[in-house]
Image (cartoon, rainbow, N blue to C red):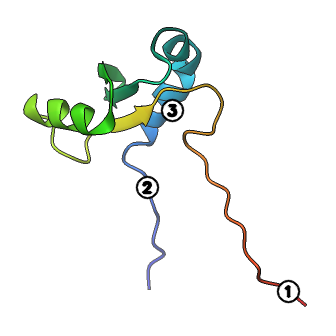
Amino acid sequence: MADMVYTNPLKDEFDYYLAHQPEFVAKYNGKIVVIKEHKVIGFYGDKPSAIRATIEQGHPLGTFLVQLVSPGDEAYTQTFHSRVSFS
C-alpha cells in the first residue's frame, strides 16, 4: 500500500498572506482578503461577500484563499482541550 501524502493546495496562498500580514493589518484589519496565485483578488467586509464576488469573477471554489485579516495567529489557529487522561 502506497503512503498517502497530504498536500494543501492553498498553502502557497496562505504563505503569501503570512508574508504580507503586517501590511494587510495596517490597512485592512478586520476585513476579509481573498488571495489566489500570490495575488490579492480583493478585500471584503465579510466572508459570504468575498466568496460570492470571487466566484462571480470566474474563480472556482477551492482555488482561492479566504482569510480574515488580523494581527497575530488567532484567526488561523485553534486550541482543543480534552479530558482524556493517559496512564
Farthest-out residue, right:
87
Q: Which of marks 3 and 2 is nearer the N terminus?
A: 2
The residue shown at (38%, 28%) is 32
Q: Mark 3 points at which residue?
A: 15
Quadrant for the N terminus in the image = bottom left
Give the side of residue 65 with respect to residue 59, left or right.
right
Q: Earlier in the sequence, mark 1 or mark 3?
A: 3
Q: Does 70 sit above or below residue 24?
A: below
The residue shown at (50%, 19%) is 29
Residue 26, by quadrant, is top right
Picture coordinates of residue 27 (x, y %)? 48, 9
Q: Give the mark toward the camera: 1 or 3.
A: 1
**Circle 2: element type:** loop
**Circle 3: element type:** helix
Determine contact: label 2, label 1, CB under 8 Å: no
Q: What residue type is labelled 1?
A: Phe
Determine contact: label 1, label 3, CB under 8 Å: no
Assess disc 1: are there few (<14), some (14-19) or many (≥20) residues with their C-alpha within 10 Å of its C-alpha: few
Give the side of residue 86 with respect to residue 64, left or right.
right
Depth check, front residue: 32 or 19: 32
On residue 86, the disc is 1
Residue 64 visible in the current orientation: no
Q: Which amino acid does label 3 sit on?
A: Asp
How many angstroms separate mark 1 from mark 3 (CA)? 36 Å
Picture coordinates of residue 22 (x, y %)? 59, 15
Q: Which of marks 2 and 1 is nearer the N terminus?
A: 2
Q: Name the residue under label 2.
A: 7
Picture coordinates of residue 39 (x, y %)? 33, 20
The residue shown at (26%, 32%) is 50
Determine contact: label 3, label 2, CB under 8 Å: no
